[in-house]
Image (tube, helix red, strand yellow):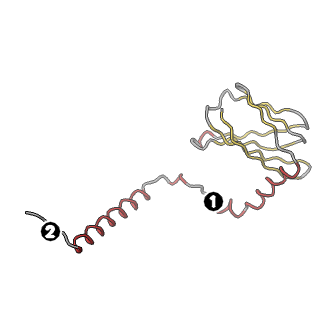
Amino acid sequence: MKIKWNWGKGIILGMGAFVIYTTAMGIYMFTQSPDDYDHQYYEKGLAYDSVYNQKQAVVRDNVQPRITLQENEMQVSFIQPANGILHFERIAEPGIDKKITFRAAAGSELKIDLAKFKKGRWDLTFNWTNQGKKYQYYQKINL
């Protein structure tokens, strides 16, 4: 027996495929891990002006830290004295992120042992102050 196709059957078949696709995408969306998004997204958005000003202050004052990578060590030198926090963030594995508090004199080198760090891409965020002025610098590195 041969099935005869007409426009009505085509519309019903198309609508059925759309309903199945929409249902599958809804199920997929609700089975995703809730950790796939940033929980402080809105708070960070509201506070972005201060972050932007800190990043611009680094460029304006020409105080970018100089980063040198060696085999198992990272050396960071600052032009001015700096007191702050260095965030090591690994996008692939947020559970192994690290924070290092530092205090560096002008022209001195901050040495960080990288032997215990996992190989791969890391995002560095430097947050520091100098004479009451706040700075933020961001850089990606590969270990």
Looking at the rendered structure, the kind of residue marked 1 is: Tyr
Residue at position x 67%, y 26% in the image: 115
Marks 2 and 1, the one that precedes in the sequence: 2
Compare residues 52 and 96 and report the one nearer the observer: 52
Quarter of image, res 44: bottom right
Q: Where's the N terminus, which quadrant?
A: bottom left
The numbered disc on residue 4 is 2
The quadrant of the picture occupied by the C terminus is top right
Q: Is residue 62 left or right of residue 36?
A: right
Q: Position of residue 65 (x, y in %)?
A: 82, 40
Amino acid under label 2? Lys
Tell me residue 78's x, y (percent). 86, 39
Answer left or right for 21 relative to 1. right
Circle 1 — which element? helix
Percent coordinates x, y for residue 128 in the rendering = 82, 46
- Give whichever of 11, 115 is nearer the camera: 11
Q: Residue at x 60, y 44 (%)?
A: 91
Q: Position of residue 83 (x, y in %)?
A: 85, 43
Q: How many marks?
A: 2
Residue 41 disc label: 1
Q: Which mark is residue 13?
A: none
Q: Is residue 113 above or below residue 64?
A: above
In the displayed structure, would residue 86 be above or below residue 45?
above
